[in-house]
Image (spheres, rainbow, N blue to C red):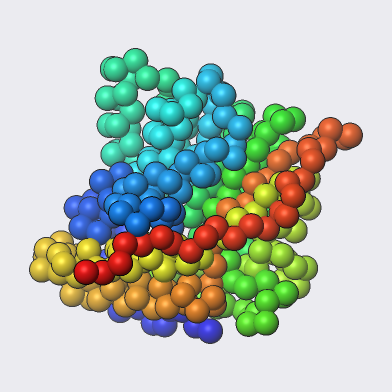
Amino acid sequence: MTIAGPIPSTVRSRDELPDDFFTLFLDKTRTYSCALWTHPDDTLEQAQFAKIDLALDKCDLRPGMTLLDVGCGWGSTMLRAMDTYGVNAIGLTSNRHQHRYVRNQLVDRLIRGHPYGGVRRQGWEEFDRRPDRIVCIGRLEHLHPQRYPDFFDFAYRTLPEDGVLLIQTVVAPGPDRPDAHQTEFAAADAVSTPGTIFPGDRLLPPNGRNPKGVTQHAEDAGFMITGIERLGQHYTTTLECWASALQEHRDRAIELAGHDTYNAYIGHMTACADHFRNGRLDVMQFTCTKHTGLHRPAPRSGTLRDIPDPVLAESA
């Protein structure tokens, strides 16, 4: 199944697009990943906070800890962690607009006496500190699969003995699913183009050895998977919400980004919503717990857990 075909050269890259374009369809926290819809009357912002809280609750955060947010975007997860758990947070992003926005948010919080926060415009390969926990939401699928071992090795080496790595990523169905297949994407050098919400060569299954799944990459690095939760249908709802909002602001979006960029975003959001709806794609949270020697944490019962489908208000 091909997700992305040729992308017009006139489609602008994410780095070229102003923040104002994304604010047309994202909630005010600018969270650009799958939300979690738990109540019929949830707003997009409430659904995004529910997703962030679900992830942070698995990290066993305590005041004074340092949380590394790999691929922090506009900072919603790290800021929530600082405000809710009293942790210090460091975010990594390669995007200059996101870096400037998060830096300004952190300055405001520092003035008001919040825990320490920092943001760096760099990749995880360059990170040189020792966080207590790592969260990575919506960043892993941007990596070429050949780099997965390096990422998980980095996380394992960087974390302390009781460290936790929380991954939320889009996956292709595993070999145990009847509709299993390989999902191919645009070339790796198209990562910067906005025509693909999940840019990269391919998505991996959650489990398996051929191709190697996310779980196996984590375990090969030394982690123990202590929980997996499936949120796929929630991405359908999230994407539909984004597409509807962007369509409502069509004229302003075209003014900011041009017709081709607008069409690329609408087309890809709509197509991907269908893939999640039909189970051809999924999104999962993986709780990866570090263990050394005999100090192995007990796995959570059930391991794989489906998050209930979105709870939405009925149309009038």
Q: Is residue 57 above or below residue 217?
A: above
Q: Nearer the viewer, residue 101 or 86?
A: 86
**Which corner quadrant holds the C terminus?**
bottom left
State the image coordinates of residue 196 (x, y, percent, origin top left): 40, 70
User: Residue 22 placed where, x, y %?
Assistant: 25, 56
Relative side of 12 to 2, left or right: left
Residue 120, relative to residue 283: is it above or below?
above
Which of the 4 image quadrants contains residue 6? bottom left
Picture quadrant where residue 252 is located: bottom left
Which x, y percent locates residue 15?
Answer: 31, 55
Task: Work out whether residue 39 can be spotted.
Answer: yes
Tell me the residue at 67%/49% (across/down).
227
From the viewer's side, name the closer residue of 159 and 285: 285
- Looking at the picture, tell me which residue is in the foreground, 287 or 122: 287
Residue beneath the point at 34% across and 76% down = 270
Placement of 257 over or under 224, stated as above or below: below
Picture residue at 22% right of the left edge, 63% below the top: 245
Q: Is residue 18 visible?
A: no
